[in-house]
Image (tube, rainbow, N blue to C red):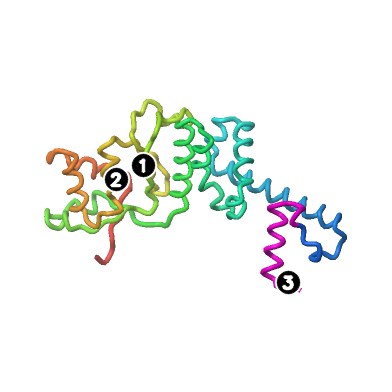
Amino acid sequence: MPSLAEGQSRFVACLQKGPAHFPDDMFAEDKARALLGLKAHANTISHARLVALEDCYPRLHDHLGHEVFHSLSRAYVEQASVMASDLNQIGAAFPAFLEERDRGGADIDLARIEWAWLESYRSAEAHPLALADIASLGEADLLAFPVAAHPAMRLVALTAPLSPALPELAGTDARALMITRAEAQILFHPLTAAQQAIAEKLPECTTLGNLLAHALELEAEATAMQPIIKLIQAGALTPVEGS
């Protein structure tokens, strides 16, 4: 008799790869009845995958239309790597899949933005740094103040003009879009090239002084703090306790 792990593997292979992988010795019923039940179960799982993917990308679904989105999503979920994914992560590779299918840059960017939004929503809680937290600090303490990127901050470099499916950003000439979750609300922040370059340095920075040093490479001394203030006001930074 096969072990539990072997039986589970054979069962999953049958669901994912079809009747050719049917485990004859696994079910008490005859093969026809067992296959009927497995098909119903597989159809339920397939439908759940399609619904989960649609839930990951509601704006892209509305923008492309149901038929186009459904055709793309069905091809996507039938990939072996996606079949092995849990529903929470099922949409992770969809932007790359759209790129492989030569979808327009705006559509690919929109998918990346929606996935980044979802990641921001699911991310850990952390206190966002506020200007009030550092307002009373002297220069030395300000430069040494320990910070990190807020766990909800996401940055999406844009490859095309923003999709019309983002009407709240209409008319924005952005090089990147930063996504933050301040006060439990997820917000979009269009960034210039300089602001993007500074935001990209956040994972490497341990203090405000580190961040300012990067800003000074891109901005004049008189204006170098402005992009950092924008990041703070957006909720992109969190203070590091106990440093």
Q: Quadrant of the N terminus?
A: bottom right
**Which quarter of the figure has residue 225?**
top left
- How far apart in space, not on screen, are marks 2 and 3 (Cα)? 54 Å
Identify the disc placed on residue 199: 2
| Residue under label 1 | 178
Comes first in the chain, label 1 or label 2: 1
Q: Quadrant of the C terminus?
A: bottom left
Comes first in the chain, label 2 or label 3: 3
- Residue sitting at 32 percent across and 48 percent down? 236
- How far apart in space, not on screen, are marks 3 and 1 (Cα)? 51 Å
Using a 10 Å C-alpha cutoff, classify the residue at mark 2 as few (fewer than 14 neighbours), some (14 to 19) or many (20 or more). Answer: many
Magenta span main SS: helix
Q: Secondary structure at mark 3?
A: loop
| Residue under label 3 | 2
What amino acid does circle 1 point to? Answer: Met
Using a 10 Å C-alpha cutoff, classify the residue at mark 3 as few (fewer than 14 neighbours), some (14 to 19) or many (20 or more). Answer: few
